[in-house]
């Protein structure tokens, strides 16, 4: 199951947020949630880089009993963050996030001269491509 997806630009602005099977609502505003998630990612990346014995290790995911949060960071610093059920393998999630970046984000956001990637993406075409992409991946799993 895919619960939700966040796309953050390199400075932490949430460009896109989508929900599919999210069952629990929060008592905070969406903007507060975005800041909390991005801050947590920043802290986890910093923590992992400081305690890792290898210089190339980076944060990619964590898992609880109920869900798995995974992150794919692009070379430009954009972060694709997805919450899924724990049954999904880390490799499968990473492949999905990389494909989402390559097939949807680059093609329908980066290459679109009418979009500013400094603010949330309000393109209906982009949103529909993400919906189609995620729904096809849900059926595959």
Image (cartoon, rainbow, N blue to C red):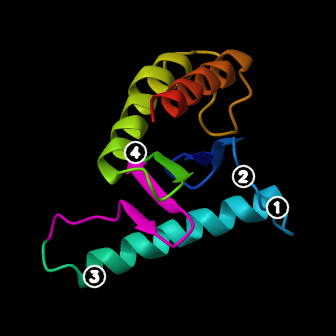
- Pointer 1: what residue? 25
Residue placed farthest to the bottom in the image? 51
Query: Which x, y percent locates residue 37?
Result: 61, 64
Q: Neighbour class for label 1 at 10 Å: few (<14), some, many (≥20)?
A: few
Earlier residue among tags 3 and 1: 1
Front residue of this view, candidates 25 and 29: 25
Residue 140 is left or right of residue 32, and the answer is left
The x and y percentages for residue 141 are 45, 36
Q: Earlier in the sequence, mark 2 or mark 3?
A: 2
In magenta stretch: residue 96: no
The residue that label 4 is drawn on is: 93
Q: Is residue 127 visible?
A: yes
Name the element at disc 4.
helix
Task: Identify which residue, 99 or 25, lies in the foreground.
Answer: 25
Mark nearer the viewer, 3 or 1: 1
Magenta extent: 55-75
Q: Residue at x 82, y 61 (%)?
A: 25
Q: Residue at x 35, y 45 (%)?
A: 94
The residue depicted at 53 percent of the width and 33 percent of the height is 138
Q: Secondary structure at mark 1?
A: loop
Q: Is residue 59 magenta?
A: yes
Q: Which residue is mark 3?
A: 50
Which dot marks residue 22?
A: 2
User: Do tag 4 and tag 2 residues touch (Cβ < 8 Å)?
Assistant: no
Q: Is residue 33 left or right of residue 89?
A: right
**Distance Cα–Cα, label 1 vs label 2:** 8 Å
Graded by Cα atoms within 10 Å as few (under 14), some (14 to 19) or many (20 or more), the crowding at tag 4 reads many
Q: In front: mark 4 or mark 3?
A: 4
Q: Are marks 1 and 2 in contact (CB under 8 Å)?
A: yes
The quarter of the displayed image where residue 59 is located = bottom left
Question: Relative to 122, is 90 above or below?
Answer: below
């Amino acid at each position: 199951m895919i619960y939700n997806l966040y796309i953050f630009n390199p400075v932490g602005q949430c460009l896109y947020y989508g929900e599919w099977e999210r069952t629990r609502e929060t008592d905070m505003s969406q903007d507060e949630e975005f800041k909390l998630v991005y801050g947590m990612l920043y802290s986890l990346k910093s923590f992992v880089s400081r305690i890792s014995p290898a210089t190339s290790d980076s944060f990619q995911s964590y898992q609880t009993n109920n869900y798995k949060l995974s992150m794919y960071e692009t070379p430009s610093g954009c972060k694709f963050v997805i919450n899924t059920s724990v049954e999904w393998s880390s490799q499968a999630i990473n492949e999905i996030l990389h494909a989402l970046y390559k097939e949807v984000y680059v093609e329908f956001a980066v290459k679109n001269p009418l979009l500013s990637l400094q603010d949330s993406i309000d393109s209906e075409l982009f949103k529909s491509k993400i919906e189609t992409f995620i729904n096809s991946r849900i059926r595959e799993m």
